[in-house]
Image (spheres, rainbow, N blue to C red):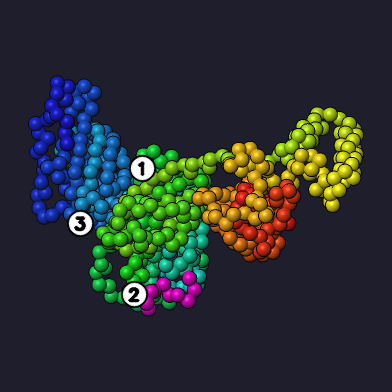
Amino acid sequence: PAPPCTAVMRLCPILLLFVPAALGQPCASINPGGSNVWHDLGTGLKHFVYIVDVAVWRPWMTLTMTWPSNSNIHVEQLSGATVVQSAAHMLKLELAGTDDFGRRITLKGTGSLNPSPGISCDGGDDEAETDECDLGVRYHVRHSWPGGEDGELLLDRWEDDREISVTFHEAGQAVRRSVMVENAAVDQVSQDCSHVPCGTVIRFDLIRDHGGVSGGAGVPKVVFQLVKPTASKPRIVCHKEYPPSPPPPPKPPSPSPAPMPPPPPRTVRAMSGCHLGGHAIVVGSHSEGSYDNLRISIEPARWSPNYVLTLALSSLSPGFSSDVTVVRAENARFLEKTPMGSRQVLLDLITLPSAGVPSVAVVVRGRGPELTALKCRELPKAPPSPPPNPLPPKYGNSALGSAVTELEDLTHKIPPQAVVALVMVVLFSIALVVLVCKQRSGSRTWLGCLRGAVGRAPEPGFTREFSPSTMGEPAAPHKGGRAHSGKPRAGAKWRVSINLESGTFNLAVPTAAASTCAELKQAIVAACLENLGSEATPPAWIEGAYDAMVVEYLDEQSEAAVVDESTDFDFLRLFPALHAPEG
């Protein structure tokens, strides 16, 4: 639209007087309803906006627009065509390969106030033909959109293993890898800078014994999809030289009109706040029974591993969120699915280190899935591991045990020679105490005598417990050495000290969980798996080899006793501490 009238910019009164065609229907004409010219009195520039209506849109047809010789045309904006030649009072435009603009060209610029420049048309065809290939190859645009183009090479005849080079005038042009190329293989992609700006050369190798015809009928062709729409006619060359061939067969009759092309693929851009940026595009889909497989390509603007990409999908089918699944993911690992009601779902994927093209290909299966959004976030770091459980005193809680512990700490602060001498003195002292103890107490074992000499300290792994009823006195069984046969106290637990290769751990096992030796061992293995995991739990215990497990407790004489099938569990419940070494 023209700018409003101001003191420095006045609308010329003659601008709306356009010259109609005198006779017949012109190939293209200025649309007076949307075109305008005006003079900017502040800058002195002559502005124009032309809407050019094209009567019949022929791909790559050229339009020549001419102005009076005193004009000085500069193009500021152009849609629907590209400038292939320009002069001060002339522009030669080439129409796009597909009509995506309603048979209209919009031209905006400066240099003339002429409301109706001259327009002439030349050439144009549905297909880009070439005389540089004896196979009669033509390039045809099947469908084009801002994010790509469906194209095909139509051949008059087919030869196996022939090479066809197509030079596109767009830099960075390429065949989309996620869409299958029919009847040929992409052999090489290179840059062509023989013209400015640089273009792209793509070489196709025709597949042997295929004929280029799907289903045995039709025109031989190679079908592929480009990552960019073509703006001008490509150049096609056949590389290999062959001896003269017989004249080509007559062209087959024109095929019936092709069905309407599919709509442009669904594309969604990454939401604001997504550090990776980019977009996600639906590159294809096919049905399997009542389910649809949706192929999605996620193309971030930048790549970083360990990022969470979230795809939002929706469907009109009830229960869609519970049925949708991720069939396959490339360059990413599926993390989780989060339903957002019965018809919407979020799919999280974690990016992996990629050595190739930084993109993610995903196949999603469900009933009528549709891509609605793309977002991303950084994978949160795992919290630090909790500190390990404190170990019980290594030498017991007795006075001598504490002294030995302090002595061990002291050895780290003195020279190694003094440590050896100190250890020899300690061992000699212990041997002397044991000898005197056996002579005076008459104990049958030196271990029992040593326990009595050091204050009946329990073996490593045990901790002396006190009965709540005695308020600090060691718990003792009832007379006769048997515990009363009442029910176990509700919530009572054994504290089981377990010595494993990975360390010593204290676990809680409910006293009500076992009434036999086998049940007690099963309960200890279950506590290990729950608190330590399968990696720390001995494999033999996990496999049920309980015979390798020994469970001990301190009896009323503070000596180690082994739990077996003859143990009275009502009596055992009076002792809150158990010991289970790995063996």
What residue does disc 2 label?
218
Stretch of the chain drawn in magenta: 207-216
Q: Residue at x 46, y 73 (%)?
A: 159
Could you tell whether 103 is left or right of 60 in the image? Answer: left
Mark carried by residue 383: none
Q: Nearer the viewer, mark 1 or mark 3?
A: 1
Q: CA distance from mark 1 to mark 2?
A: 45 Å
Q: Find residue 171 and report its horizontal and vertical position in percent.
A: 43, 48
User: Is tag 1's residue or tag 3's residue first in the polypeptide sequence?
Assistant: 3
Between 583 and 461, which is closer to the camera in this rendering?
461
In the visual, does 439 lie left or right of 120? right
Q: Residues within 10 Å of mark 2 (few under 14, many from 20)?
A: few
**Name of the residue lying farthest toward the front:** 479
Residue 177 as seen in the image, left or right of residue 75 = right
Report the disc number at residue 56. Answer: 3
Q: Secondary structure at mark 3?
A: loop
Whole-number angstrom distance, CA of label 1 to CA of label 3: 40 Å
View extreme (bottom): residue: 216
- Secondary structure under the numbered disc 1 in the rendered image: loop
In the image, residue 92 lies at what x, y percent? 29, 46
**Residue 208 belongs to the span the image colors magenta:** yes
Image quadrant holding the N terminus, namely top left
Residue that numbered label 1 is attached to = 271
Q: Which residue type carries mark 3?
A: Val
Amino acid type shown at disc 2: Gly
